[in-house]
Image: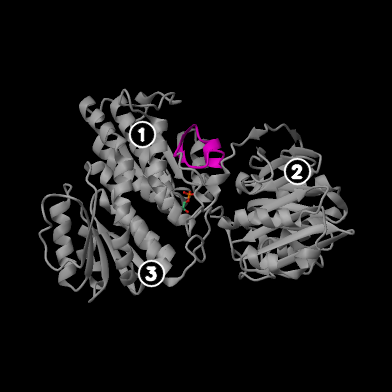
Amino acid sequence: MCGIIGITSSKPVSLAIINSLRKLEYRGYDSAGIATLSNGAINEVKSEGRVDNLEKNSAIKSMMGVVGIGHVRWATHGVPNAINAHPHSSENVSIVHNGIIENSTILKKYLIGKGHIFKSQTDTEVIVHLITEHLKENDLKNSIIKVLKQLQGSFALGIIFKDQPDLIVGARRGSPLAVGYGPNENYLGSDSYALKSMTNKISYLNDGEFCILKKDQVKFFDEDGLKVNKKVLELSTDEQNYEKGDFKHFMAKEIEEQPTTLKNCIKEYVDTINNDINIYNFPWDLKEISSVTLIGCGTAYHSCLMAKYWFEELTKLDVTIDIASEFRYRNNRFKKNNLYIFVSQSGETADTYAALDLCNKNGMKTCSVVNVIESSIARDSNFVLPIHCGPEIGVASTKAFLGQMLVLYILVLKLGILRKDLDKDLYLSKIKDLKILPRLVEETLLTERKIQAISSTFTDAKGSMFLGRGYSYPIALEGALKLKELAYVHAEGYPAGEMKHGPLALIEDGMPVVVLAPRDNYYPKTISNMQEVIARGAKVLLITNKSKDEVVSENIWETIEVENTNDDLLPFLLTIPLQKLAYYSALKKGYDIDKPRNLAKSVTVE
Ligand code: F6R
């Protein structure tokens, strides 16, 4: 992952770099560093841990350069410490890198043979020495072209040179990179968010391109050094979405925002007067589509799994789903009549992007469901369906999960009606139900107090299980993932009916188990599975929906009731208490909720 920033200006840049690094911390936060050019030398300051530590480093105050680069790291090669933190520098060159250099071992051997001395355990340091080596015989531009061709793997780079006091080079393959244009200064950044406080005028590098930035000039080149013309895009200014407001954490804010984000998304896609769905201009003839493959990672994969159930229930399309890191290396049978749907909040996840790229290269029909509409996945798919939920800053995905499910559900309904798989009256009634979903989510958020009280049982547990059947199974997986990543409690999501095939052996006295059993077609079966775990000592938290009928089962530890709606939409409501459960379990332990250990928001390495 990692985040990079570069600024070339006529005034000192170190403070502005630190401010941008704070915005990039969602990409990695195990160490941070900055390098500037001043008095004909490269000055480097690096610290282990957060950007706050870097800012406290007394050496920062005396950094006077008007050209500089900065980095926040998510370690791949080498432990997270100040030595392995970026930038990495030789006497002549300093580099920040996001990505992985796959042939670094071979290159390192070659460079050591040439007399280069390595200080860190990182793959990145080979780039520094490789450029230094090429600069002995080539000018700057040709050195860059040659080095980029030697590197295997993925990278976004920011590079400064001792002998070029006004210049930064940026280069991209795989990992994203944006250029921003300011008044008498220009910027390089991993994303537009990092640059937003300085400019709203942005261009993006495509794969294989590099750029040379001066304070008053930006030039783009392809991998052979031929000039490339770029469009300058103007970004909207929605700064307030990047603030926590009165909330203690972004995650808390993002959970509470969900009624609004769902409402906004429904407004974009649903014609509430005519009860129809506004998705037009598909770039393919729908008659040519007979099957769908949904691809994503983590939480986004869970929304793919959810969509599989809806597609199968409401259309006659064949559906497969895949985890992007598996799909990209399998021997796939690409089918012309298959629609490939890529789901990603950030739109930059390396595995999901690689899977999309593979489909594009095989001439497949590609569609993406993304939050960040300027992202690589959005830009490179044939058709984009944004989830319209605004920036998600907390590392754990919450409002984006609901947004992804909502857009996928809307797409299922639209394809169902266009293909005549779905009866018109059923279609209309589903849209009517959809319109009141935000209110039901708002009411379900009121389960908070009870969840807060229950959460300490999970905080103190050795392990836990989340069980569900049918539509509730993807939500069980998502609930378990949230608890793992935030409260660092082992949690397994399982199809309730699968417990007796092995995992039941894990159940012991007092183990907290969440059972998702809304009153849908699966209800009696799930209740039986719940009794099986209770009989073996589990402390069951039952999450169901409100009903006039009481739950007929004994020895349930706690019950939470979400609002009532049709079976398709219950997964949205069941998700809410699980988000809160993970939040409060982590809060009780005092963990860093918005930046859980070992993780990053945008996973741009494979
Ligand atoms: C979990 C979480 C991750 C992401 C995954 C994919 O809370 O946030 O599992 O869902 O890394 O990220 P995107 O959606 O950006 O492709």
Span highlighted in magenta in the image: 368-387
Question: Is 296 in front, or is 563?
Answer: 563
Extreme residue in the bottom direction: 509
Name the colouring of the figure. one colour
Q: Would you name the residue on which mark 3 appears? A: 489
The numbered mark, 3 or 1, whose residue comes first in the sequence reads 1
What kind of residue is marked 1?
A: Leu
Label 3 sits on a secondary structure element that is loop
Is residue 32 in the magenta section?
A: no
Query: Is residue 384 toward the left or the right of residue 122 in the image?
Result: left
Label number found at residue 411: 1
Query: Is residue 255 toward the left or the right of residue 159 in the image?
Result: left
Question: Is 314 in front, or is 67?
Answer: 67
The numbered mark, 2 or 1, whose residue comes first in the sequence reads 2
Q: Alpha carbon of mark 3 to alpha carbon of mark 2: how far?
A: 45 Å
The numbered mark, 3 or 2, whose residue comes first in the sequence reads 2
Is 21 located above or below residue 416 in the figure?
below
Q: Would you name the residue on which mark 2 appears? A: 186
Q: Place residue 440 in its image quadrant.
A: top left
Q: Position of residue 167 (x, y in %)?
A: 82, 48
Label 1 sits on a secondary structure element that is helix
Cβ–Cβ under 8 Å for marks 3 and 2: no
Q: Is mark 2 within 8 Å of ligand 1?
A: no
Cβ–Cβ under 8 Å for marks 3 and 1: no
Kindly identify the residue that appears in the image at 45 percent across and 53 percent down: 253
Q: Position of residue 595 (x, y in %)?
A: 51, 61
What kind of residue is marked 2?
A: Asn
